Amino acid sequence: QVQLVESGGGLVQAGGSLRLSCAASGRTFSSYVVGWFRQAPGKEREFVAVIRWSGGSTYYADSVKGRFTIFRDNAKNTVDLQMNSLKPEDTAVYYCAARYSSNSYYYPQAMKEYDYWGQGTQVTVSS
């Protein structure tokens, strides 16, 4: 069983930056893919970014490409999401998710493809 814990959310002005962190308790992320999703009020949860722990390759939603960076921190065993140039429309609860995968070309973007989820962290961007 993998338990995920997000941290780093908060309130920031438009144009500012935040860094979210996703930690796994009980194991490392080795051989896992880890994704970030977000859910704004009244909207469905949507894909943001995904990273393969082995190799570090990534994939992003078009809405965040060039502004957000997903990366692994080997020392802390976390998957972080650096969010720059934040916009009010980035306001949402952000969730990290994970699943085991040995397929080097697999970048899951649908919620149903993930087995483990964190509890979410709120990000609010004021205009």
Image: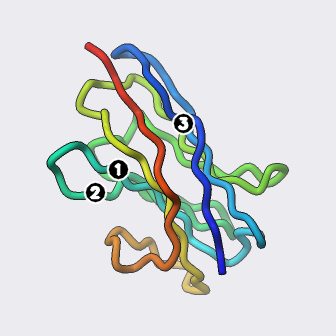
- Marks 3 & 2, CB-CB < 8 Å contact: no
Q: Residue 42 location in percent, x, y?
A: 15, 48
Who comes first in sequence, dot 2 or dot 1?
1
Q: Which amino acid type corresponds to the residue marked 3 in the rendered image? A: Gln
- Local packing at callout 1 (Cα closer than 10 Å; few below 14, some 14-19, many 20+) is many
Q: Amino acid at mark 2?
A: Glu
Q: Position of residue 105 (x, y in %)?
A: 49, 78
Q: State the colouring used for the structure image.
A: rainbow
Check whether the beta carbons of the residues at disc 2 and disc 1 lie within 8 A of each other.
Answer: yes
Q: Which residue is mark 1?
A: 38
Determine which residue is flagged by label 3.
82
Image point (45%, 38%), residue name: 68
Q: How far apart, in angstroms, are the residues tagged by discs 2 and 1?
A: 5 Å
Where disc 2 sits, the SS reads strand
Image position of 70 with respect to 56: above or below: above
Horizontal side of 12 relative to 43 (left or right) equals right
At x 68%, y 78%, the residue is 31
Q: SS at mark 1?
A: strand
**What is the number of the mark on residue 121?**
none
Return the disc, 3 or 2, that comes first in the chain's sequence.
Answer: 2
- Rounded to the nearest angstrom, the CA distance separating label 1 from label 3 is 14 Å
Q: Nearer the viewer, residue 35 or 93?
A: 93
Q: Callout 3 environment at 10 Å: few (<14), some (14 to 19), or many (20+)?
A: some
Please, what is the three-letter code of the amino acid marked with disc 1? Arg
Outermost residue to the bottom: 102
Q: Whole-Å distance between the Cαs marked 3 and 2?
A: 17 Å
What numbered label is drawn on residue 46? 2
Q: Which quadrant of the rendered structure holds the N terminus?
A: bottom right
Residue 64, given in percent of the width and then of the height, sits at 34, 41
**Closer to the camera in the image, 39 or 61:** 39
